[in-house]
Amino acid sequence: MRKTSKPKKIVTRRDFLKGAALGTLGMAFYGKDRHIFAKMAGGAGPFAAENPQSTLVLIRNEKAIGAGDAIDPAVVQEMIDAALKEFSGEQDTAKAWAKFIRPDDTVGVKFTRCDWMRVHTEQPVIDAVVKRVGEAGVPKDRIIAQDGGLPFAKCTALINVPTVKVHTLTGIAVSMKNYINFASQPSKYHAPSTNLGEIFVLPDVKGKTRLIIVDMLRPYFGPGPQINPLHRWNYYGIMVGTDPVAIDSTCLRLCQAKRNLFKGEDWPITPPPDFISYADKNLNLGTSDPAKIKLIKLGWDKDVLI
Amino acid sequence: MSKSRPQENKLSTAASSFASILPQEISGWQKSREDPVFGRENIFDYMDGAGEIYLAYDFRFIFVREFAQENAPSIVVEIYQMSSSEDAFGVFTQDTDGGDVELGQGAIYAAGLLRFWKDRIFVRILADKETPEAKSAVMKLGEMIAAAVHQEGKRPGLISALPSEGLRVKSLRYFHTLVSLNSHYFLAGENILNLSPETEAVLAQYERGKSRARLLLVAYPSSNKAEAANKQFAEIYLKEKPAPEGKLHPIELEDSKFSSVTRKGRFLLIVLEADTFPLCERLALEISHRLED
């Protein structure tokens, strides 16, 4: 008996309107239920989830960026420490880091260096992470802070330190996009980028990501492909978590809110970053549904947007 | 290696004309390194992750000169050589946020970034941070380049089909392929309109009174190709049978907005997200009348 293969379903904008694609995120960005985020943004508590499945800590400090957009390393260090203590439930910084990093680890600190676009992880953020990893007992020669060429296979632990930017080909580039150069053929994950999360489950990557520390000091919300300074803003934030899907989902909400504010009308991020829901539903990599993400907010709350 | 060398030589020769346009020093900023040139084969060495957007146009090469000055922001000049003025215009429309400036055939300045197009070149000049001195140097560099390009180029003819009433000029985008469409407006995960380097497309927003709509106009090499795309759009996106006479009346979609598709000869005219049925119908009709048969 001949088998007939089912025709491939083509996802269209209408699927987003119906909420059939991207799940809750789709409804949020393209559908009538966008107001659910408006409620959250203006809501009473730090999180609205009834049954949170993933926790993130967002900390903001208006002193983190000074005149001429200079980053204050001491403030950044304080922010990362405070966020990590909150995230780990420890009162002490050293104990907090010890929950994630062991002295016998070889630690890869994967940051984003994007010279041509200039939206890269700020050096004080990288330095703060490297400093604490060293204080956790890892010798200098086993701390490898790098973007391209990071020898991830020989690392026993990875700390993902991305920045936040809207991206012409993937929709948004945060923690999942930051690992794209771990793939043997990175361009395979550009347009479409649905399978981007697969990189997290490559044999030499899977299970190694102990922490994600997102540089949200100066995110980028414009269309690209190259920087337009009008589309960069000082958000003064650092986010800490371990769930790349929840982190990307939350940063997507932030950038979408900022875009709408900038234009004074809906300005959907495009192409839709469907890799976020794919990583949730198909790879079980984390939680994409904002209603199931517990976002703990610390510090400065002016224009927090999420 | 033997293959890439002639290509590199060709690029170097072509780029040398740009090198001679630009000064070694401007207002205290000095040329800070050798001028790199990137072609279609190695554009990713310069902009890994975004080269696709330029490759989606008939891009030939990019010439880069960097200027530096102590205690001042760096300035980077990028000159994109395209094969046609239409594509120089198209790349220019990729991002139109900023204030209009009188330069070349269209220019925008915002916070240290100047972009303009003239004839077959598109230029970006970016000061790392905006200061009055850096802005002045950026503008002077732009004027030098624009003055050195002696002729003006054609804008895409397809644009003349757009009625001016209610057109949000800054929303206008001109492109060829799906990568570009998706970077402006997501229609579908697959290439249901069969966009290719052979197609020309214009995307624009309209606002008439309190009603808005988007318009996507595509020119195909032949009416057969336009009809194939018409059929796919009607069936896959609108979930309707394509109209035999080529015009499908406005359909209300899930967001309570209207969409329609009309094929006229080798053109496909799609109205999207129209707030009202009459606006959807009116726009399609007006543009249809303006298109050649």
Image (cartoon, coloured by chain):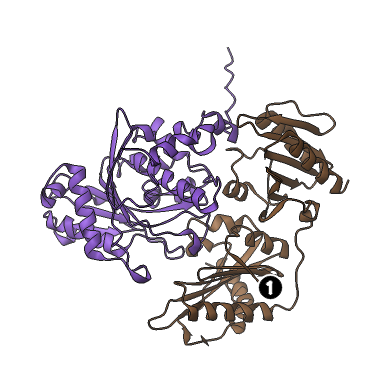
Chain colours: A purple, B brown
* Residue A111 position within the rendered picture, expressed as x and y whole percent measured from the top left: 32, 56
- Of residues B2 and B125, the one nearer the viewer is B125
Q: Position of residue A70 (x, y in %)?
A: 33, 69
Along the horizontal axis of the image, is B71 left or right of A107? right
Give the camera-side residue of A48 and B247.
A48
Residue at 39 percent across and 49 percent down: it is A174
Question: Where is the C terminus of chain A found, in terms of image quarters?
Answer: top left
Residue most extreme to the top: A1
Q: Is residue A283 visible?
A: no
Residue of label 1: B104
Q: Residue at x 39, y 83 (%)?
A: B70
Where residue B270 appears, as percent x and y from the top left, is: 73, 40
Q: Residues within 10 Å of mark 1 (few under 14, many from 20)?
A: many
Please name whichever residue, B50 or A242, is drawn nearer the observer in this view of the structure: A242
Query: Closer to the camera, A51 or A277?
Result: A51
Residue A258, percent from left and from top: 46, 50
- The chain letter under disc 1 is B
Query: Against B7, is A279 above or below?
Result: above
Vertical arrangement, residue B48 with respect to residue B30, above or below? above
Under tag 1, what secondary structure?
loop
Q: Quadrant of residue A290?
A: top left
Residue in the picture at 76% in, 36% down: B278
Residue A231 visible? The answer is: yes
User: Image check: B117 left or right of A147?
Assistant: right
**For the image shown, how many numbered marks are present on the structure?**
1
Residue A205 falls in which quadrant of the image? top left
Pick out the residue farthest to the right. B293
Amino acid at the residue labelled 1: Gly
Instruction: Pick the quarter of the image with the N terminus of chain A.
Output: top right
